[in-house]
Amino acid sequence: MNLNNLSEIMPPDLTAEILGLITEEKYKRNHILHKEGTTCNYIYIVKKGIARTFYHKEEKDISVHFALEGDVTTAIDSLISREKSRYGIELLEDCELKVISYGELQALLSKYPQYEEYIRAIILHSYVQLANRVEEFLFFNAKERYDNLIKEKPMLLQRVNLGHISSYLGITQETLSRIRKSV
């Protein structure tokens, strides 16, 4: 679901209301958009660049999601629960983002409850993406996960370092190198 053009998925009156709440921000590469251990108060739509969601485990940095142009990124665990997130979000390139505050979105939905179905659809899309990632780790081997990444987001290999990609796939960089050589 590409959200760079909201008018394609939402009625004109909702699009106008949401566009009135959105700000556009620019950040440099390596900026931490959301710090793990804090409550997330924003939803971001990547207009230009790449954002990476990650966590730390046993002093390792593990990538769990990449958001490219048109994709939504947020610390969804925190946004929904309103508790501190275990995830951080880092920008891998200079980025232009569309930003909407959780509080302003909630106020809009309180004022116009009929719009909840559209926001729910966006959240459900995020949930389906998460469920697909879990299924990849349950049912696919490393080569199949790599092949799926190439099929779904081929440009990542040119724009993201292999360390982040290998952690996203749940494999070592050495295993990633062997898989790439076999292709």
Image: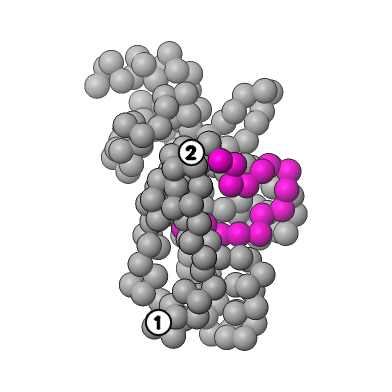
x and y percentages locating residue 73 in the rendered image:
51, 52
The residue tagged 2 is 29
Magenta-highlighted residues: 31-45
Disc 2 from disc 1: Cα separation = 34 Å
Q: Residue 175's mark?
A: none
Secondary structure at badge 1 equals loop
Q: How many marks?
A: 2
Kindly check if marks 2 and 1 are in contact, taking CB atoms under 8 A apart as contact.
Answer: no
Among the two numbered marks 2 and 1 on one chain, the one whose residue lies closer to the N terminus: 1
Q: Nearer the viewer, residue 71 or 147?
A: 71
State the mark number for residue 11.
1
Q: Residue furthest left?
A: 183
Q: Which residue is located at x 35 percent, y 67 percent?
A: 5
The residue that appears at 75% across and 54% down in the rendered structure is 83
Task: Identify the image's colour scheme: rainbow, by chain, secondary structure or one colour.
Answer: one colour
Which numbered mark, 2 or 1, is in the foreground of this view?
2
Q: What residue is at 42 percent from the left and 16 percent from the top? A: 175
Q: Quadrant of residue 82?
A: bottom right
Q: Residue flagged by tag 1: what amino acid is it?
A: Pro
Density class for disc 1 (Cα within 10 Å; few <14, some 14-19, many ≥20) is: few
**Is 36 included in the stretch rendered in magenta?**
yes
Q: Is residue 174 left or right of residue 60?
A: left
**Residue displayed at 53% across by 36% down:** 30
Q: Nearer the viewer, residue 37 or 140?
A: 37
- For the residue labelled by badge 2, is the local secondary structure a helix, a strand or a loop? loop
Q: Badge 2: how crowded within 10 Å, few (<14), some, or many (20+)?
A: some
Above/below status of 98 relative to 18: above
Residue 6, picture quadrant: bottom left
Identified by mark 2, the residue type is Arg
Residue 85 placement (x, y as % from top left): 69, 47
